[in-house]
Amino acid sequence: MSAPRALRQRAEAQAETLPPLLARAEHLAGTVLLGDHGRRRAGLGDDFWQYRPAQPGDSRRMIDHRRSARGDVQYVREREWEIAQSVMLWVDQGASMRFASDKTLETKADRARLLGLAVAILLVRAGERVGLTGTALPPRRGNGQIHRLAEAWSRDVAADYAPPEHRAMIPHARALFISDFLGDMAEVELALTKAADRGVRGVVYQVLDPNEESFPYQGRTIFESVGGTIRHETLKAGELRGRYLERLAERRDVLVNLCRATGWQLGLHHTGDSAQTALLWLWRSLDGGTR
Amino acid sequence: MTVLGGIGFASPWLLTGLLALPILWLILRAVPPAPIRRMFPAVTLLLGLRDDESVSDRTPWWLLLIRMLAVAAVIIGLAGPVLNPQREVDGTGPLLLLLDASWAGSAGWGQRMELLDTQLTEAGRADRPVAVMRLSAPEAPVFQSAASWRARLAGLKPEPWQPGAGQLAVAVEEIRSVSGGFDTHWLSDGLDFDGREQVLSALADRGDVTVFQSPDPVIALRPAQYADGAIELSLVRSVGGSERVQGVVALGPDPSGTVRVLERAEARFDAEATEARLALSLPSELRARITRFELEGQRAAGAVALTDDGLRRREVALFAGRQDREGLELLSPLHYLTQVLVPTADFVDGALLDVIPANPDVIVLADVATLAPPETSALTEWVENGGLLLRFSGPRMAASDIGRDESDPLLPVRLRSGGRSVGGAMSWGEAKTLAPFPENSPFFGLKLPPDVTVSTQVVAQPDPDLADKVIAALSDGTPLVTRKPLGLGQVVLFHVTADAEWSSLPLSGLFVEMLDRLAVSSSAKQVDAEALEGTVWSPVRVMDGFGQLEEAGNLPGVDGVSLVSDPLGPEIRPGIYSNEKRRLARNVLRSDTTLLVAEWPPSVPVVGLLVKAERPLGGWLLSLALILLAVDVVASLALSGRLSALRRATPLIAAVFVFAPDAQAQTAEAAERFALEATHEMVLAHVLTGNKSVDDVAWAGLLGLSRTLYYRTSVEPADPIGVDLERDELAFFPMLYWPVTPDQPAPSEAAYARLNTYLRLGGMILFDTRDADVARFGSGSPNGRKLQELAAPLDIPPLEPVPGDHVLTRAFYLLQDFPGRHSGTDVWVESAPMDAERIEGMPFRNLNDGVTPVVIGGNDWAAAWAVDRDGRALLPVGRGLAGERKRELAYRFGVNLVMHVLTGNYKSDQVHVPALLDRLGQ
C-alpha cells in the first residue's frame, strides 16, 4: 500500500471517530445555557456596561451619539471588561480508561472525552481559550481548537495508566483533569502540587465504571489490567470485595486531601450515570472559579 | 442374567466400575474450578490482597457427591438393571393348565389370558407339552406343544355358570383317563364350588398342583326385586375387605329404541361387609323400560341382572257394567279384580274410547254386554294389535243377546241364552267344582283348591271348535274359561262373574294364579317352582360369560320348574325365557346366593394372578445421570461466579418453558379482543376467502356500505371485519358477506357446524358469486359450482328469486332490482311459504316471519360499494351518470339488506299501518 493511501486510510479511520464525538459533545454542550462571565467592571468587551458622562481625555470617537443627542451632556458608552481565561484540559488516554463492564455502558475513555470536549465547546463559546496541558496544544480560542482537541483525544495511549501531564502549565490559568485515578498517585500528587505552585486551580474529575465501585465478582478469577501488564488471581473474588472497597475509599481520601491542600475541586462520575449531570457539575465548578 | 437384591443385571461386570468411584472422588476433590479471566482496570487496588481461606480451592463435598452419583448412575444404568426379572420356572414333563372358566373370572379374563400366555411361553421355552382344560366345559385334555395352544388362546371363553356336578364328574373322569403324570397349574376364578376337592385330589395324584388365584373379590349382582314402590338391588362380593363403592347402571331402550343408561346409582359395601343394598325409585314408565342392571366396570355374567315381567307393571283398564252404584264397594264387580291387581298393576282410568289410545296392556270388561259400534271397532283394532281383552260374564251378559246366533268378534264363543244355575236352593245337584286343567291350557300345573265351586255360569254353544277354545272347564266338562286369538291379541272369557256372586273362584288363590298365568297381573315376587309347574319356557336371548346377550338360536325349551330351581349349566343358560306372553329372566345369581372364596389346602401353593412385567431401569438411571450432570453444571457455574451470565439467560429459558401456556393465553386474549372489536359497535363482516384482492375489495365494499348506512340511516356501523370461519366466533355479526372464489378452501366440519348454528340463530349470509356479467345464477360457472359445493353442508331452506313484494324491496328504499357492479336479475332468498296469498286490498303478501337466512346473487356488490379510506370509489361501475346511478342503487340494496337483517319483517308489518291508524282514530 502506498504511503499516501495508507495515510489517507488512517486519517479516515481517525476522522470517523471525530464527527460522532464532536456531534455528541455539541449536543451535550447545547443543553447548558451559556452565561458570560463578565468582570463586573468597565473594560474591553462586547457587552454594554454603562453610560458615563464624557470626561476630558476621552476621544471623540468614544462619545455615544445616540445617548448624547437626548440631552446636553455627552455620554460615553462603556463596555464591560471581559477577559478570556485559559483553561487547560487533561483527559486520561491510558488503556485503563478503555473499559466498560457492560456492553450497554460506554467506556470510561469515551465518557471522559465526551465530557472534556463538551466543556471545551462551552468554554470556546464563552470566549475562553482552551488547550491541553503540556506543549502539544496550547490554549487558543475558536472552533478550530475544538477540532484539534477532538483530534488529540482520538489517539489512544498504549500504557495502562497514563500519568497526568503537568508540563508547561500557564500560571493562574484554570485546569480540568479527567481520569479514573487508578494509576500511580504520586504522579497525580506531583502534577497537582506543581499546578498549585503556579497558581493554577481547577477541577479533578474521577470517572469510574459502576463495577469498579461495586465489585460484583465471585469465584475463582484472574483480574487483568486492560493492557494486560498487571494481573491478580484470586480463588474467591467475593471475599475481596470488602477490602477492595476499603482501598478504593482510601484512594479517594488521598484525592480529597490533595484537592483540599491545593484548592482544587474534586468530582466523581460513574459511566452508568447521565453525562449531562456530569457536564452541568463541571461547568458550574469551572464557572464558579471565574466569578 | 444375574440377580442382585431383586434386580437383575444384563451385564453385571460393568458394576466393577463402581470401584473406581473413590479414586474419582480423590481426583475431583483435588482439582479446583477453572478460573475466569476478567479485565479489570482497578486491579491495582487488588494487588497484594490475599485469599483468607484455603478451603475454596477444593470442590465442595456436595458438588462432588452430585458428580459421584451421576457417575454411579451411569455405571449402574449401563449394567442393564431390570426390575422384576422373570425367573425361569423349573419343572419338566407335561403341564395341564386348568381353568375354572366360570363367569366369576370373566371380569379379569384379560389378566387370566395374559397369565396363561406367560405360562404357555414358559412351557414352550422348557419344551413341555401342554393341555388346557376348562372345568365349566370339560373336554379330554390333549397334550400339545405350547405354540399350538397359544394360537388357540383367543378362542377360550368363560362360561356363564360355575362348574357343576355334571361337568366336574366329566372332568375328573377325563383327568383320571390321562396316562402318565403331569403337573397342573390351576387358574382359579376365586369362588368355591362343590366337588372342587375331588378334582384337586385327582390332580394331586398325577403331579404337583399350583393354584393361581387373585386376592381381589368377585362382585356380583343378585336379581332385581320390586318392593314398596322401589327396585331393590343387592350386591354381593366374595371377600369382605375394605369399604368400596360400586356403580350400578340400569340399561334399557329409550323412546327411539336405542339402548341407553336409564339410571345410575352407587352401592356402598361397608368395610368387611359382603353384601350391599340399593333401592332405586323410578317412575313406572322408566322402570318398565329397564332390561338389565349392570355393575360398572365388571364385565361378567354375574354382574348382570336381567329383568323380566317382575319389574314391568302392566297397565290395566277396568270396566264394569254397572258403575253407578256409589257406596257399594264390596258389591262392585271389580272389587276382587282390583284387590288382585293393585300390588302388581297400574290402572288406567277413563272412558273406554279415551283409554284405548293410551294402549293399556289389558282391558277388563266385567259383565259388559253391549258396546257401541265405535267402541267395538276400536276395541277390536286394539286387540288385533296385541291387546288382551278379559271379559267376565254376569247377569247382563246372560240377559243380553250378544253372541247368540253368530259369533261376536269380542267373545271367544257363542253363548246360550240364560245360562245355568246349579247347586242353589232351587236347583238339583251340587255346585260344580273345577276339572284339572288340560295340558294345552296356560293354567296347566296349577293346583286346584277343593273348595272352589261354581254355582251359576253362562254356557257356551257347542260349536265344532269349542274344544280348542276351552282352557278351563268344570268337573262336568262345561267350559269355565274360553279363549280365542284375535290378530296379535286374544280375547278371554270367564263364564262366571268377577265377584263372588256366581262362584267362589274370585275368593280363592287360584284366581290370582290364573290371572298371573294370563299375564293380566305379573308377579312381583320371585317366581317359585310350583307356580311354573307344567310350563315349558323357550329361551329368547341367553347370556355369555361376559354378560352379553346373544340370540338363543335353536336352543331347546326348558321345563318351568327346572328353569327356576336347577343350577345353571349348558342346558339351562342364564338369559330371557318366554312362555306365551310372559317373560322370565334367569340370572346367574339367585336372590339368596352368597359368594364363597375358594380355600385351598395348605399343601397346594397359591400364587397371585399378577404377572409383574419386567421393567428395565437402565433408561431411568441414565436420565438421572443426565439430570445430575445438569444440576452439576448449574452448581459449578454458581460456585465459580459465572452464574450471572446464566441469570441473564433466565428470562429466555423461562420464556421457553412458559411458551406453551403463554401461547394459549395469547389466543384467548386474541379471541377476547376480537369479541370486543366485533361488539362495541355493530359491525358488518365478510368471510376471508384467502384471495387477497377479493378480501380487500370485500372489506372496502363493506366499509363503503357502512359509511352509507352511517350517513343515511340510524345504523351506525364501525369498520368492517374479515372473519376467519375456522377461528372466529360468528355470533357477533348480523350478516356475513361471502364472496365466492373458485379456489377458496371449503370450511371444516366444525366451521360448518358453527355456520349452521349461526344461520339457525338468525344470522344471514350474503353469497356473492361475482359473475353475473358472464353467468346467470346456477348455470355452472366455476364460482357457481364452488357456491354449490360450499353451501351443500349448510342448513339452507328452499329458495326462490326475490318476489316483487319481498321485504327486501322496501325495507328502507323502494327497489325493483338489486344491481351491484353487474346488474344480473337473479337474487335468491328463502322462498315464501306455500300458503302466502295476496289479500285483497293489501299491497303485499304476508310473507316469511323472519329474516331470510341466505341471500344469493352474483352482482359483485362489494365492488360497487367499495371505497377507500377517503371515501373515493375504488372501482368503476358502468359509464358516466348511468354508472353512478347504478352505484347508488347498489348502495340502496345494501341499505335495504342491512335494514332487513336488523329489523326483520318490520316493514312487512307496516301493511297494517292504515288499519292501526284507523283504529287509533276511533
Image: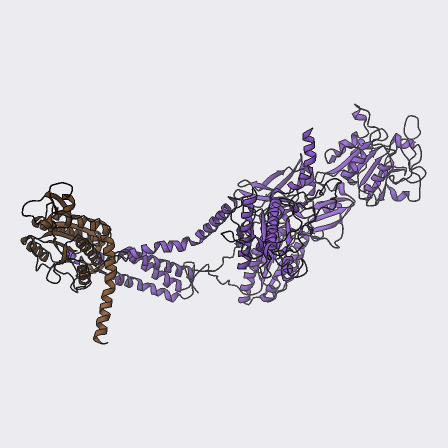
Q: Which chain is brown?
A: A
Q: What color is chain B drawn in?
A: purple
Determine the residue positioned at 67% across, 30% down.
B920
| Position of residue A225 in the picture relative to residue B800 (left or right) | left
Position of residue A282 relative to residue B25, above or below, is above
Residue B476 lies, in percent from the top left, at: 90, 37
| Position of residue B714 in the picture relative to residue B806 (left or right) | left
Image quadrant in which the C terminus of chain B is located: top right
Residue at far top of view? B327
Foreground pick, B701 / A223? B701
**Which quadrant holds residue B124?**
bottom right
Position of residue B861 relative to residue B346, above or below, is below
Image quadrant in which the N terminus of chain B is located: bottom left
Residue A105 lies, in percent from the top left, at: 26, 56
Position of residue B461 relative to residue B44, above or below, is above
- Is residue B738 something that shows in the picture? yes
Residue B405 lies, in percent from the top left, at: 95, 38
Foreground pick, A182 / A263? A263
Residue at far bottom of view? A2
Residue at far right of view? B405
Residue B538 lies, in percent from the top left, at: 76, 49
Foreground pick, B553 / A194? A194
| Position of residue B402 in the picture relative to residue A73 (left or right) | right
